[in-house]
Image (cartoon, rainbow, N blue to C red):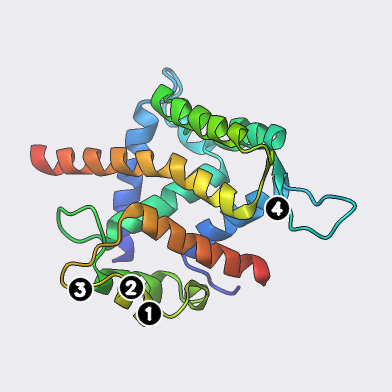
C-alpha cells in the first residue's frame, strides 16, 4: 500500500496487532482468533497507557467480563474490532468534551 | 489542512501526556504504543471530519472522509451511496462514532484480505 494516509496506517496497525496476538487452531482451517489470555496480554502490553485511567480500565474489564459469558473463549476479528471500539468510544467522548471546553474557555 | 491537523494532534497529545506520569515530562508521549497511537488517530480523524459542535458525521462529511482519508481502503467499505441511503433522510442522517468505527472495521477486513 504505497503512500497510505494516517487513517489507513492506523487501521493497518490495528489489523497487524490482531495478527500478532491471534493464532490459528492447529487442526482446522478456521479463521485466526485471540484467546482470552492473549487478549488480556494484548491489553496490558499494547494499551497500558490508555487504560491507566480507571474509568477506561473498568470499561475494559466489563468488556472481558461480557466475553466470559460467551463460552466460546476465543476472540474473532469482528469481536476484537468491536472490543477495541468499546475502548475507543469513551476516549473519543473525553477528547471531544475536552476540545469543546477548550473552545469555550478561549 | 495538513498543518492544521498536526497542530490539533499535538494539542491532544499534550493534553493526554499532561495527565501522565509526574516527573517525566513528555516521556509518556514517546511511550505510547503504536496501537494506542493508531486508536487515537482513528478517533482524531473522526473529530476532524465532524464540522461544528455536533457529535456525528453527516452523509457528506462521511463521503469526504472516505474519499480523502481512505483512498486505498475506501472500496472495502462498500458502496457509499448504498450506505448513505441506509442512513435515511440525508438531511437528518447521522453517523455516530460507533457506526464510524464499524465502517473502519469493514476497511480493516479489506486490509486483511490483501
Q: Secondary structure at mark 1?
A: helix
Q: Residues within 10 Å of mark 3 (few under 14, many from 20)?
A: few
Q: Quadrant of residue B52?
A: bottom left
Determine whether label 2 and label 3 are within 8 Å by CB.
no
Q: Percent x, y for residue A41?
A: 67, 32
Instruction: Name the quadrant of the N terminus of chain B.
Output: bottom left
**Residue holding disc 1:** B82
Chain label for disc 3: B
Q: Which mark is residue A25?
A: none
Protein chain holding label 1: B
Residue under label 3: B89
Q: Is residue A48 visible?
A: no
Q: Are marks 4 and 3 in contact (CB under 8 Å)?
A: no
Give the Cα distance between marks 1 and 4: 31 Å
> x, y percentage for residue B8?
29, 50
Number of residues whose C-alpha sits closer than 10 Å to that of mark 4, classed few (under 14), some (14–19) or many (20 or more)? some
Estimate the x, y position of residue B57 in percent, counting from the top left. Answer: 26, 62
Depth check, mark 4 against mark 3: the one in front is 3
Find residue B42 and report its image quarter: bottom left
Residue drawn 15% across and 53% down? B53
Q: Are marks 1 and 2 in contact (CB under 8 Å)?
A: yes
Front in this rendered view, residue B22 or A12: A12
Q: Within 10 Å of the Cα at label 2, are there few (<14), some (14-19), or many (20+) other Cα atoms?
A: few
Q: Residues within 10 Å of mark 1 (few under 14, many from 20)?
A: few
Residue placed under numbered mark 4 in the picture: A19
Q: Position of residue B7 (x, y in %)?
A: 30, 52
Same subunit: marks 1 and 2: yes
Residue at the extreme top of the image, as rendered:
B23
Amino acid at each position: 500500500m504505497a503512500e497510505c494516509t494516517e487513517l489507513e496506517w492506523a487501521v493497518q496497525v490495528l489489523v497487524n496487532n490482531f495478527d500478532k496476538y491471534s493464532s490459528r487452531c492447529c487442526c482446522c482451517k478456521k479463521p485466526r482468533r485471540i484467546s482470552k489470555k492473549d487478549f488480556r496480554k494484548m491489553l496490558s502490553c499494547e494499551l497500558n497507557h490508555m487504560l491507566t485511567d480507571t474509568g477506561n480500565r473498568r470499561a475494559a474489564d466489563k468488556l472481558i467480563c461480557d466475553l466470559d459469558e460467551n463460552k466460546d473463549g476465543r476472540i474473532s476479528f469482528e469481536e476484537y474490532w468491536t472490543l477495541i471500539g468499546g475502548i475507543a468510544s469513551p476516549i473519543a467522548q473525553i477528547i471531544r468534551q475536552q476540545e469543546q471546553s477548550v473552545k469555550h474557555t478561549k | 489542512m495538513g498543518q492544521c491537523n498536526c497542530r490539533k494532534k499535538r494539542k491532544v497529545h499534550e493534553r493526554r501526556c499532561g495527565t501522565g506520569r509526574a516527573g517525566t515530562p513528555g516521556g509518556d508521549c514517546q511511550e505510547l504504543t503504536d496501537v494506542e497511537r493508531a486508536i487515537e488517530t482513528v478517533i482524531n480523524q473522526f473529530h476532524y471530519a465532524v464540522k461544528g459542535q455536533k457529535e456525528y458525521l453527516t452523509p457528506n462529511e462521511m463521503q469526504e472522509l472516505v474519499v480523502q482519508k481512505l483512498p486505498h481502503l475506501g472500496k472495502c467499505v462498500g458502496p457509499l451511496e448504498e450506505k448513505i441511503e441506509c442512513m435515511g433522510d440525508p438531511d437528518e442522517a447521522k453517523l455516530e462514532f460507533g457506526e464510524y468505527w464499524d465502517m473502519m472495521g469493514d476497511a480493516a477486513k479489506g486490509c486483511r484480505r490483501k
